[in-house]
Every structure is written in C-alpha cells, then in structure tokens.
Amino acid sequence: MDVTSGPVWIDGQVVDGTDALVHVMNPSLHYGWGAYEGIRFYPSGTPELTGPLVFRLREHIRRLFNSSRALGMRIPYTEQELIRACADLALRSGLSSGYLRPLVFLRAGAMAVAAQLTDVQVAIGCWAWSGYLPDADKGIRVRTSGWVRSGPAQLPPSIKSTGGYINPSLARLEAVRGGDHEAILLNQAGRVAEASAANVFALLDGVLVTPPVEEGILPGITRDALLDLAADLGVPTQQRPLAPAELRMAEEVLLAGTAMELVAVTTLDGLPVGEGTAGPVFTALRAEFDKAISGQLPAHRDWVTDVTGV
Ligand code: PMP
C-alpha cells in the first residue's frame, strides 16, 4: 500500500485513496495554508493489548488543533472525533504498522491570500511507511545547512503548517543533493534549531542535550518521549541552547521524529561523530523506544492507543 492507494478519511467518510481528490484551484495548494500531523502505529508487543497501537495519538491531534487555530482555521470536528477517525482508519487499513497523515486545509471556492479561512476540510491518509531514510539503522550522514530555520516572527516552527515546510525542505534538498541524508538548520542566532523533520539531541559529557522550544523548534512529540525515556534509563538530560561547535564535540548525535523515529548521526559535515558508529546511548534509547511504541512499558502505557478499543 503506497501513499495514494491506502484508504482516506475525508470530511467524515472513508473512501478509496484514488477517490480522495481535491480541485487544483484549492487555495491551500497555492498558498501553503494548511496544518498537518504525522502519526505512527505499531503492532502490540504485549498480550494485554490487541493493537495496532497508535503512538501518542492524543498529543498529535492536540497539536493539529493548535496549529490550525494559529492559522485561523476552525476544525469542524472535535478532538475525540479525529482521534476515533485515526484509530478507525488504522484498523480499516489492515496494516499492522503504518503512518497516519491528518491534513487540515481550505475548501476550493475562493482564491485570495488568507481568504475564506472558515471553510475548512479535514482529510486523513494512511499508508505503510517503514523506512523514512534508507539504511537508517546504520546511522546517517547529516550536514549543517546554509538555510536558517524560519523564526517566530516569520513562520513559527511551533506551528506545523504545510507552507512552513518550504524552509526545512530547502535545507533537506541541499543536503540530499550533496550526498547526505538530512540537514540540521541553525536558528537566527546561529545556534542549533532542528533537522528538516526531526529534533536534535547531542550527548555531551554524558548529558543528553536538546534545544528548548524558545530556540525555534517544533516541540516534537518523539522528543518529549525521549526526554522521559532517557530519564528512565538514568541518562541525564538538559534542554538548553546548543552551539554548532558542540555538535562536533559530541560523543553522540541523535535525530528524533515520528517519521524518522530515532536515528544516530554518524557523520556530520563530512566528519565522524564520536566513533563514527551508532553509540551506546542511542542503542539503549532505541531499545527503550521500541518497547514504548509496542506498549511494553507499563509506566508509559498511556502513550499508546489501542485501535480496537477507541
Ligand atoms: N521538527 C520538525 C520540523 C518536524 O517536521 C518534526 C516531525 N513532525 C519534528 C521536529 C519531530 O516532531 P514529532 O516527534 O512530533 O514527529
């Protein structure tokens, strides 16, 4: 099942992906006025839950509402309705693991910048998306981008808007064209912000450091989970501004996001990070993350939603 052929929930109905069409004169397509989320579901790893299990569904839907509100779009459903729609769609897809993509956008009809914000549509896609980056388990090559992350007074990174992705996409394009897998963008002050679709962590003298929200990042839901999991494993964490030079000195650098999950950066700007292989903190966190997403951590059972029980 690819991105276009899976079932799509649109305006309250589930249709075949090939029938989920919008008009080309849709203003969201022209001006990038939309909000979206990326959500993953996984097989259950415990007999107590049937599965599939959606990871942090409530938090993703809450962020979708927040992003939409910030763009002046009122979603014509409740959070609970969209939670149920996501769970239903995952179940109907028949996939044991996959990706859900809720999108809030404007209905075609008027065409002007920031016009007709009241006519809002919601669609949710579902497909199998195993590896966002090929061979990511061996570690990835990342470069620091020449593109600067848009700031709070331009396109706030905390709003997950469709148009907001042009900025990190330019950085990723530059990295991929140059033979790397991913880009890290700096903020306007020249400090580390985030990757094109993931948050950044650096292990510095045994402390797992990640930039705080004020540094101009999307407050990632995976990032939030990792801060908890690191604490559970006894790895100290710190949210503080991070200089690009610190990334070069780090024992380990990790990227975390829903699509990418958790990956080790083994090469940064052409130089090896640490030993140039995935390090022990990455390996321990990845194992704990795998337990969390499959419902095997009783302390974090509330992170997973069993699609059979919604
Ligand atoms: N930053 C950006 C720019 C992203 O696109 C993403 C992916 N949504 C993240 C961080 C990580 O967020 P999350 O863990 O909630 O997927």
Image (spheres, rainbow, N blue to C red):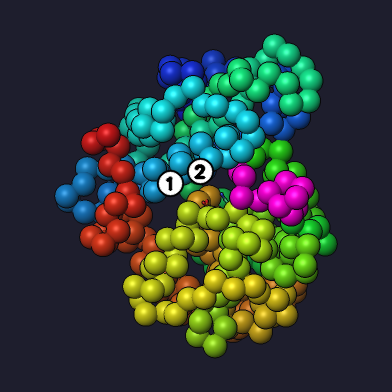
Q: Which residues are magenta?
A: 150-160
Q: Which residue is identified by label 2?
A: 63
Q: Is mark 1 within 8 Å of ligand 1?
A: yes
Give the label on residue 129, or none. Answer: none
Q: Position of residue 223 (x, y in %)?
A: 50, 61
Residue 171 on the magenta span: no
User: Disc 2 vs disc 1: Cβ atoms closer than 8 Å?
Assistant: yes
Q: Nearer the viewer, residue 144 or 93?
A: 144
Estimate how packed mark 2 is, as few (under 14), some (14 to 19) or many (20 or more) residues with alpha carbons within 10 Å.
many
Task: Residue at 67% x, 80% y: name it.
Answer: 246
Relative to 191, is 273 above or below? below
Task: Residue at 69% x, 68% y: name it.
Answer: 192
- Check disc 1 and report its element: helix, strand or loop: helix
Q: Which residue is identified by label 1?
A: 59
Relative to 143, is 34 above or below? above
- Check disc 2 and report its element: helix, strand or loop: helix
